[in-house]
């Protein structure tokens, strides 16, 4: 039960486990995901919904009594005409139950813990709650829109109220889940992309929120969602899921403990991100001393200072990438290897290029190029070493632009053997050419390009 001890005793494990994000985020550590802390948050929720986060109290009224309170409240709402009488549900089979419950807990269907408020077509101004309105980090509605009835999108249909829990059934892996904590004015209406749960009085909305975010429920959703680009589950599948219900008092204790531990995770996360940012800034500052070196001796001295702490400095992907970029920068600035005064200067190399180009024009292999304007001092990003020259790409190469119009080959024109057809998909991140999945075109097609 001592989850705080689990966190503290293994704090290095939680805070140093990193992985690369698929997209960049804020700050110099934006491409890094604190994988350890992410897993810690998942563990907290996993323990919570299994009844292992806080101790059970034998004096708590058991969840079986809670279910009776729910049944009575449901019957009263049906009697008042506020909700429709629900259809009887099949019993939960043993195969559906993912784990053993503590004493005093009960398994029930998601559909039994709350109700919806029906749907309507807006006929006046309303507060529209869409997926984009949710702050996923805090599970709250942050940016709802005020719309007129005539501007209402077709999906603006589901009525919600203060205390309602909403769950996006489209791309559920994004965990767009929130509790409506405010009594919005004008009337709030949510998108049909949400499943709606307005908890019965005996149920804690925060406990439901955390359960829907737990690995247990995520696994259920992943087992029944359909679609690849935009996976989704329908309302029937969502409400057919089951939830482990603790006594009301324990629900409150669990949610309080989760909030405490998540706050601790926030602190660990902020500390780790600050450390990562500071580390990256230090790395970049030290690497800048290399590119700013005025001569080989100064470069050697600056590198010696960095290399003494190599294993400490270059421990993350961003720091290693920064080192790679610095090596390339030093190379193109002429600072990576010493100059040899016996080398033929680049001015002579450019003369030979000019001669070769003139011969190719004479042979009719390339067209005569228009004179290029001289390079201004403003265009030169740094001072080149003695023997080097700045020149335009057009002076040292021939740019050939193929036909991107109607002659551009399509998949139907690919052949088994022929001339390799290289496209951007064959260029690896390291600058090499991949020959896997190569397509081929005929010589006739090649000559049309």
Image (cartoon, rainbow, N blue to C red):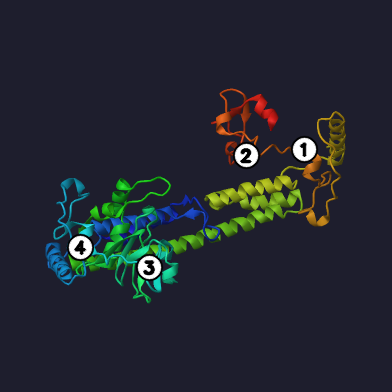
Q: Residues within 10 Å of mark 3 (few under 14, many from 20)?
A: some
Reading the chain from its start, which is encountered first: label 2 or label 3? 3
Q: Which residue is mark 4?
A: 55
Cα distance between the residues tagged 2 and 3: 45 Å
- Check residue 398 in the rendering and tell me which mark sits there, or answer none: 1
Rendering coords of residue 240 (x, y %): 23, 53
- For the residue pair 84 and 60, the one nearer the viewer reads as 84
Q: Which residue is mark 3?
A: 140
Q: Which residue is mark 2?
A: 431
Cα distance between the residues tagged 4 and 2: 57 Å
Looking at the rendered structure, the secondary structure element under dot 1 is loop
Question: Quarter of the image holding residue 258?
Answer: bottom left
Relative horizontal placement of residue 316, taking residue 109 as reference (left or right): right
Q: Nearer the viewer, mark 2 or mark 3?
A: 3
Reading the chain from its start, which is encountered first: label 1 or label 3? 3
Rendering coords of residue 100 (x, y %): 18, 51
Cα distance between the residues tagged 1 and 2: 20 Å
Cα distance between the residues tagged 4 and 3: 29 Å
Residue 122 versus residue 371 in the image, above or below: below
Residue 229 versus residue 271 in the image, above or below: above
* CB-based contact (under 8 Å), mark 4 and mark 2: no
Rendering coords of residue 131 (x, y %): 41, 61
Q: Nearer the viewer, mark 4 or mark 2?
A: 2
Cα distance between the residues tagged 1 and 3: 58 Å
Looking at the rendered structure, the secondary structure element under dot 3 is strand
Question: What is the tally of numbered marks visible in this picture?
Answer: 4
Cα distance between the residues tagged 1 and 4: 75 Å
Q: Which residue is depicted at the point 31% across and 50% down? A: 221
Relative horizontal placement of residue 400, taking residue 218 as reference (left or right): right
């Amino acid at each position: 039960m001592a989850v705080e001890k689990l966190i503290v005793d293994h704090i290095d494990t939680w805070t140093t486990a990193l992985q690369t994000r698929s997209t960049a985020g804020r700050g110099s550590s934006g491409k890094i995901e604190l994988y350890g802390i992410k897993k810690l948050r998942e563990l907290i929720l996993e323990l919570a919904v299994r009844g292992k986060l806080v101790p059970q109290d034998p004096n708590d009224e058991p969840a079986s009594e809670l279910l009776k309170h729910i049944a009575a409240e449901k019957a009263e709402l049906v009697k008042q005409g506020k909700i429709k009488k629900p259809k009887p549900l099949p019993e939960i089979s043993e195969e559906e139950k993912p784990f053993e419950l503590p004493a005093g807990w009960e398994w029930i269907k998601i559909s039994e813990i709350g109700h919806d408020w029906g749907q309507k077509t807006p006929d006046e101004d309303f507060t529209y709650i869409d997926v984009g309105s949710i702050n996923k980090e805090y599970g709250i509605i942050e940016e709802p829109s005020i719309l007129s009835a005539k501007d209402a999108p077709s999906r603006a249909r589901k009525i919600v109220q203060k205390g309602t829990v909403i769950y996006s059934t489209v791309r559920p892996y994004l965990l767009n889940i929130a509790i409506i904590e405010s009594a919005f004015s004008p009337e709030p209406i949510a998108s049909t992309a949400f499943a709606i749960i307005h908890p019965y009085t005996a149920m804690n909305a925060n406990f439901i929120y955390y359960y829907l975010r737990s690995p247990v429920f995520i696994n259920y959703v992943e087992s029944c969602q359909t679609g690849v680009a935009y996976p989704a589950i329908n309302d029937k599948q969502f409400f057919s899921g089951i939830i482990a219900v603790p006594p009301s008092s324990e629900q409150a204790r669990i949610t309080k403990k989760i909030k405490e531990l998540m706050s601790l995770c926030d602190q660990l996360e902020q500390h780790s991100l600050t450390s990562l940012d500071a580390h990256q800034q230090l790395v970049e500052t030290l690497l800048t001393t290399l590119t700013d070196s005025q001569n080989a001796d100064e470069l050697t001295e600056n590198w010696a200072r960095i290399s003494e702490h190599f294993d400490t400095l270059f421990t993350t992907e961003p720091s290693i990438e920064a080192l790679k970029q610095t090596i390339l920068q030093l190379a193109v600035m002429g600072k990576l290897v010493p100059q040899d005064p016996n080398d033929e200067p680049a001015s002579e190399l450019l003369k030979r290029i000019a001669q070769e180009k003139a011969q190719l024009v004479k042979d009719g292999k390339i067209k005569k190029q228009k004179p290029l304007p001289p390079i201004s001092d403003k265009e030169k990003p740094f001072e080149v070493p003695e023997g080097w020259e700045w020149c335009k790409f057009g002076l040292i190469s021939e740019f050939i632009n193929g036909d991107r119009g109607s002659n551009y080959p399509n998949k139907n024109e690919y052949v088994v053997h022929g001339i390799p057809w290289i496209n951007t998909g064959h260029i690896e991140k390291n600058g090499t050419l991949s020959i896997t999945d190569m397509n081929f075109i005929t010589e006739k097609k090649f000559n049309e390009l």
